[in-house]
Image (spheres, rainbow, N blue to C red):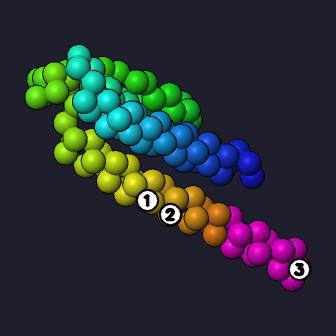
Amino acid sequence: MAGLFGPVQDMLQGALEGLAMRGQIAAQNIANLGTPGYQAQGVTFAATLQQALQTGSVDPQVVTLPGAMNQSGNGVSLEQQLSLLNQVALVQQGVMNGIDLSQKGMHTILQNLGGPGV
């Protein structure tokens, strides 16, 4: 049965790890809001999730984001980074709900298999 649920669980775990990385990078960007010359970074993730559906693994990459310099002389937009943190939290909640449903489904299957006459 691990073959049936294992890849899904692995992909969901990888998604959570990628989301955590995205949140850390956004926090790093916010911390460098006043650092002259700092360019905001991001995590490529949608493409890796698409790939994960085929390969079963998620490999997020940190990239420098293009953007105009702000008043502090760097490329960080506080509004964009705070929005990104909110998006990360929402997607993390969705992934956790997926994990919860997967676990409940497995529990139901195991209960039904262990019924009378089995």
Q: Is residue 56 magenta?
A: no
Q: Position of residue 81 (x, y in %)?
A: 27, 41
Residue 29 is labelled as none
Q: Which residue is mark 3?
A: 117
Q: Position of residue 104 (x, y in %)?
A: 63, 69
Instruction: Report, in whole angstroms, how far the alpha carbon at label 2 lies from the one at label 1.
Output: 5 Å
Q: Which residue is mark 1?
A: 94
Between residues 89 and 69, which one lies in front from this camera angle? 69
Q: Which residue is mark 2?
A: 97
How busy is the neighbourhood of tag 1: few (under 14 within 10 Å), some, or many (20 plus)? few
Contact between marks 2 and 1 (CB within 8 A): the answer is yes
Report the amino acid beneath label 2.
Asn
Q: How many marks?
A: 3
Please, what is the dominant secondary structure of the magenta stretch? helix
Q: Is residue 113 magenta?
A: yes
Mark 3 or mark 1, which has the lower sequence index?
1
Q: Residue furthest bottom?
A: 116
Q: Is residue 53 visible?
A: no
Q: Secondary structure at mark 3?
A: loop
Residue drawn at the location 20% of the way across and 23% of the way down: 74
Between residues 108 and 117, which one lies in front from this camera angle? 108
Q: Position of residue 14 (x, y in %)?
A: 55, 39
Residue drawn at the location 61% of the way across and 49% of the way down: 9
Between residues 1 and 118, which one lies in front from this camera angle? 1
Report the amino acid beneath label 1.
Gly
Q: Position of residue 89 (x, y in %)?
A: 40, 55
Q: Is residue 103 above or below residue 65?
A: below
Q: Residue furthest right?
A: 117
Q: Is residue 109 above or below residue 26?
A: below
Residue 78 occupies which quadrant of the picture?
top left
Q: Nearer the viewer, mark 3 or mark 2?
A: 2
